[in-house]
Image: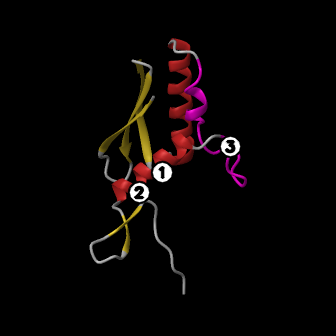
Amino acid sequence: MTTSFGFPFHVDASGAVRPDGEDAELRGQVLQVLFTAPGERVNQPEFGCGLFNLVFDPDNTIMAAAVEFSVGSALTRWLGDRLVVGGVDVRSAEEALTVEVAYVRRKDLAPQALRVRFR
């Protein structure tokens, strides 16, 4: 007998651990790709896009293009069987970096978006 639970998960009102819905699962996987730096996982050293590493780079159009490319290519590589990346938008304002990812779930072609902001 195998016992496991999905990521992300929550504790319901009765105290039982339950996986969140499919939208939350895919969103969690997108966040894992964004926040994992290449080399961080021993068995998958190429996994991730190193978004945190790019935060300290100079704030210019070259950095924004590098972030857009690295995020889009990493999501396509690692989650391409579950989603299609529609676009990655990088904005910088008031010493904060905002990355917005638009994607479509392959299962039902539902458009989704995820926004991450760093200060």
Measured in 3D between alpha carbons, the distance from the residue under mark 2 to the one under mark 1, in whole angstroms, is: 6 Å
Residue behind mark 1:
29
The answer to whether residue 86 is above or below residue 62 is below
Q: Is residue 24 left or right of residue 42?
A: left
Residue behind mark 2:
25
Which of the numbered marks, if any, corresponds to residue 46? 3
Where is residue 82? Give x, y as percent. 45, 50
Measured in 3D between alpha carbons, the distance from the residue under mark 2 to the one under mark 3, in whole angstroms, is: 21 Å
Secondary structure, mark 1, is helix
Give the image quarter of residue 1: bottom right
Secondary structure, mark 2, is helix
Q: What quarter of the picture does the C terminus occupy?
A: top left
Q: Is 56 covered by the magenta stretch?
A: yes
Q: Give the range drawn in magenta.
A: 38-57
At 59% across and 20% down in the image, what residue appears? Answer: 57
Crowding around mark 1 (Cα neighbors within 10 Å: few <14, some 14 to 19, many 20+) is: some
Give the image quarter of residue 50: top right
